[in-house]
Amino acid sequence: MRKIIFILFFFTLTIVSAQNDLLANNYFEQGEYEKALSLYTKLYKKNKNFKYFKAIITSNQQLENYTEAEKLILNKLNEKKVIPQLYVELGYNYSLQRNDSLATIYYNKAILFVKETVKFNYGRSVGLAFEKYSLIEQAIRTYVIAMEVFPNSDFSYQLAKLYGEQGNLEKMFDSYLTLIKKNRSYLGVTQQSFSQYISENSEKEANILLRKALLQKLQSKPDILYNELLSWLFVQQKDYKKAFIQEKAIYKRMGDGDLSGIADIAYIATKDENYETATLIVNYLIENASSPEVKIAGYQHLMKIKLETASKNEYLKIEKEYQRLFSEFGEEKNTYQLQLDYNYFEAFKNKKQEFAIANLKSFSKQPLSRYQKARVKMLIADILVLDERFNEALIYYSQIQNEVKGNLLAQEARYKVAQTSYFKGDFNWAQVQLDVLKKSATQLIANDAMYLSLMIKDNSLEDSTQTALRHYARADLFTLQGKEEEAILILEDLLLNHKGEKIEDEALLKLGELYEVKKAYAKAEKNYQMLIEYYNKDILADDAYYKLAQLYETKLNQPQRAKECYEAIIDHYEDSIYFIEARKKFRRLRGDEIE
């Protein structure tokens, strides 16, 4: 019984102590230092926890009880076991009293202790104590000395960060390179840190210093690590040819036939619309492919580039090139993706819908996986929509949902059922499908579903006949069909005859996009500006700002206006999907060294 009472008594004391700890911490965080000091003093008497001691010192300093703080620290330093970071605390206590000479004496004592104590490495604890008070120079000296005394210790990461804060970029880069040479797992962290200092401008100081450091390392101690980082740097600078040279060097040195690094550069260059360099790289991939599969993938990429850059009078040439590839590699499962691309080209670019559908139906009889067959059906359905054979398309989309249940493709098919119903003018059935997708689809599809659903609802409330919505859906379909002129005519008429209606903001945005396609940039600018002026609190306002910013930056050569649009997104639309990219572009246009 006595044992149970003792256990209960001890348990109660533990709970009370924990409650006092939380209360003291709360007072401390709220700046109520007198109350915090009282509680921490009581706690420290019962438990000599160093955390409580430091809180007592800080509370005294906040209350300007410097003499009391000094007395407590000196008493602690006189104990048998010396805690060297207390020299830093004592020095800082003198610094708060503007006694910098005494502060320096005790800072030096802390560093000397690290240097002279060879049995235990105090570098980390003393270094962190200096970092706590932003004493960068002292922290650097501490880590450098600790590494000299204990050669197996490595404070390169801490030094790199401190050199960066100090603005000593040369030493910062060198420390990071030392770190990743010893431990490759820090490569991602290092690149993330580098990206704070370098920019797209290859002439910026940070870019020059990093490039110089990497080239010097390559010359003195060649390692593919430095090639990889040079490649990464050149990609940040959008200098894809130089990145390609580095990736080739890695490929040749490794000798394992791995072309993935080169393929990544080709993909990035293509995405950035640097088609000339991308073509050069892809041709190298094809020439050095170790298997037919890799070669086919290379040709697939090459054909996509050609399609992006081809004019209509070059379509026959592209058609013949696809036929040549099928003659070489066959028209079976191994050229699956190539055949999808080819038939997409024939239907959507070359306007041979019936030809493409016949090809795909024939191809679907090949021994393809269930998913691959569903993908073929999806393209057939898309072409049927393009050809305005909506009911046939809906049958295919429904089949896909049943054949790949639970797959993302099934969700995509459901969305396309909704979209096709919308094109067809069956807005009620479209809404039913969209309501399901908003709850269960992936983020991307759910966002698309949400947008289309809101548009249908908003434009059905005031106009029960949905006349404006039907016109807009028709313009949407014409856009899909590549009939930009027809779509523009419908939207211009819509803005004229349905002025002030809910559909107006969607029409302004769509019209701006179409004018951009037709290279009528002044008209595009006007539409985006009108949307911003009349609908700046609407859901599409951030879209208009971002598209206008892109237009100013990439087409109209007006960086100042682009910067203002990006700034508007940052200031007024913090929940926008464009927020992060807008902030990045704004800082770059402002000329920030650190992005």
Image (cartoon, rainbow, N blue to C red):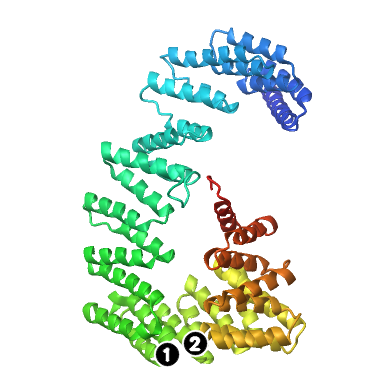
Instruction: Please name the residue that numbered disc 1 is placed on.
Output: 353
Of 403 and 433, which appears nearest the observer? 433
* Residue 83 drawn above or below residue 403: above
Q: Nearer the viewer, residue 412 or 209?
A: 209
Q: Nearer the viewer, residue 545 or 265?
A: 545
Q: Residue at horizontal 70%, vertical 73%? A: 530
Q: What's the amino acid at mark 2?
A: Leu
Residue 101 percent across, percent down from the top left: 60, 12
**How many numbered dots are placed on residues in this image?**
2
Report whether 164 appears left or right of 373. Answer: right
Where residue 386 is drawn, which disc sits there? 2
Q: Is residue 573 visible?
A: yes
Give the residue type at disc 1.
Answer: Gln
Quadrant in which the N terminus is drawn: top right
Q: Visible in this render: residue 421?
A: no
Residue 302's spot in the image, x, y percent?
Answer: 32, 71
Residue lying furthest front: 557
In the rendered image, which quarter is residue 334 located in? bottom left
For label 2, count other residues whose C-alpha is less than 10 Å away and answer few (under 14), some (14-19) or many (20+): many
Look at the picture and state if 446 lies above or below 177.
Answer: below
